[in-house]
Amino acid sequence: MTFTADDRTAITELISMHGHVCDSGELDRLDEVLTPDVVYDISDFGQEPLLGVAACIAAGRALGQLNPVGHHVTNVVLTEVGDSRVQARSKGLGVNADGTTASLTYEDTVLRTPHGWRISHRKIRAHRTPLGGRA
């Protein structure tokens, strides 16, 4: 199957939908964004990777009021690596309740499933130094 412009639109919307689902507190809808066996790698934040949608939901609930109030995504770049697999890189901004912000990169593996495109692996990389630390 060929990777089409419609696929690009669907994947970009999928990546954007993650923020809408989280920011609205509709964590039970994460299965609309993630595969059931997703690996959600937050090791850059000193945490073990989350394994599976249920673990992602539980982690979001446990974080409670410490969750960002806004997940914003931009600069989505997609690379087809197979008929049913795409690598996606995007930039993220997290806005916290106290007004502080954080910049990060999402590195996603996105799979075509019977239910549409879903993120099967996400690595979140925090930006803590300008120029990626290559000053």
Image (cartoon, helix red, strand yellow):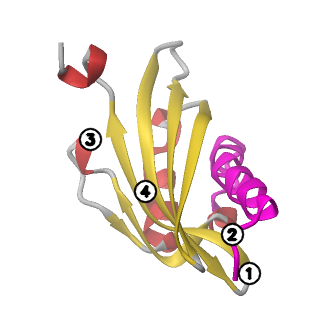
On the image, which quarter does residue 119 sit in?
bottom right
Q: Determine crowd level at label 3: few under 14, some 14-19, many 20+ residues with C-alpha closer than 10 A.
A: few
The circle drawn on residue 59 is: 4
Residue underneath mark 2? 3
The circle drawn on residue 53 is: none
Residue underneath mark 3? 45
Kindly report the distance in space between the C-alpha atoms of the residues bearing marks 1 and 3: 31 Å
The circle drawn on residue 115 is: 1
Q: Nearer the viewer, residue 35 or 81?
A: 81
Kindly report the distance in space between the C-alpha atoms of the residues bearing marks 3 and 2: 33 Å
**Residue at left offset 59%, top offset 79%:** 84
Kindly report the distance in space between the C-alpha atoms of the residues bearing marks 1 and 2: 17 Å
- The amino acid type, in three-letter code, at marker 2 is Phe
> Where is residue 86 shown, x and y percent of the image?
54, 65
Q: Quadrant of the C terminus?
A: top left
Q: For numbered disc 3, what is the local secondary structure?
A: helix
> Mark 3 against mark 2, which lies toward the viewer?
2
> Mark 1 against mark 3, which lies toward the viewer?
1
> Mark 1 against mark 2, which lies toward the viewer?
2
In the rendered structure, the answer to whether residue 10 lies left or right of residue 108 reads right
Please say if 102 is above or below 6.
Answer: above
Q: For numbered disc 1, what is the local secondary structure?
A: loop
Which mark is first along the chain, 2 or 3?
A: 2
Q: Determine crowd level at label 4: few under 14, some 14-19, many 20+ residues with C-alpha closer than 10 A.
A: some
- The amino acid type, in three-letter code, at marker 3 is Phe
Q: Determine crowd level at label 1: few under 14, some 14-19, many 20+ residues with C-alpha closer than 10 A.
A: few
Q: Examine the structure image and report whether residue 24 is included in the region drawn in magenta.
A: yes
> Where is residue 74 shown, x and y percent of the image?
61, 33
Q: Which residues are magenta?
A: 1-27
